[in-house]
């Protein structure tokens, strides 16, 4: 097992923990309480440095796609769902039902939603782009307010329109 390093990035929507190895990013998650931050000596690999740079570009509106290697263990089903998340275009959303259809099983909508919630590599694997069938902003590990911010940000950059939600 490769050594896992971690670092933090202060984004416009809060502190982000970046964990990874010399070869891939394993986690990108929001930290809401100082107690959630690890103590001790963090490390940073080249891929983590690239991740931080790409996050800076993403938040400044200069990057729409990430091109750094990621890895999170999961079942075949989970990998399939996470793979489909990577296909959702920047500035677009789909519903959990649509995502279920894309993986070939409309009846798996609850399992798809649960898998979406288990994504440990937020933003890069864009689980924030999945919304309810009624267009509601349901569920996001980083908080619904962050999901809304991320969708607004992407919509503004890709469509030149200030607001997606009223």
Image (cartoon, helix red, strand yellow):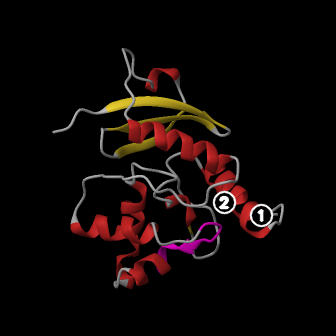
Other residues around mark 2 within 10 Å, as few (<14) / some (14–19) / many (≥20): many
Q: Which residues are magenta?
A: 90-97
State yes or no: residue 2 in magenta: no
Residue 87 in picture, x, y percent from top left: 47, 72
Give the residue displayed 37% in from the left and 45% down from the top: 25
Task: Give the vertical position of 152 relative to 110 (above or below).
Answer: above
Q: Quadrant of residue 10?
A: top right
Residue 29 in picture, x, y percent from top left: 47, 41
Q: Which residue is mark 1?
A: 165
Q: Which residue is mark 2?
A: 151
Give the residue displayed 30% in from the left and 38% down from the top: 21
Q: Is residue 29 left or right of residue 89?
A: left
Residue in front for this viewpoint, 36 or 22 = 22
Element under disc 1: loop
Q: Quadrant of residue 4?
A: top left
Element under disc 2: helix
State yes or no: residue 91 in magenta: yes
Mark carried by residue 28: none
* Distance from Cα at disc 2 to Cα at disc 1: 9 Å
Task: Give the vertical position of 97 relative to 53 (above or below).
Answer: below
């Amino acid at each position: 097992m490769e050594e896992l390093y971690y670092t933090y990035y202060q984004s416009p929507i809060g502190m982000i923990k970046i964990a990874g190895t010399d070869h891939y990013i394993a986690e990108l998650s929001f930290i809401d309480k100082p107690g959630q931050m690890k103590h001790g000596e963090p490390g940073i690999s080249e891929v983590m440095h690239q991740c931080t740079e790409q996050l800076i570009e993403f938040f400044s509106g200069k990057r729409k796609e990430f091109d750094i290697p990621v890895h999170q263990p999961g079942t075949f089903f989970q990998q399939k769902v996470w793979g489909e998340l990577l296909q959702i275009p920047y500035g677009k959303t789909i519903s959990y039902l649509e995502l279920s259809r894309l993986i070939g099983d409309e009846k798996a909508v609850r399992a798809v939603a649960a898998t979406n919630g288990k994504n440990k590599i937020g933003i890069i694997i864009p689980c924030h782009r999945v919304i309810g069938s009624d267009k509601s902003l349901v569920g996001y590990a980083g908080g619904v307010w962050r999901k809304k911010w991320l969708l607004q940000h992407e919509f503004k950059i890709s469509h030149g329109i200030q607001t997606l939600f009223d």
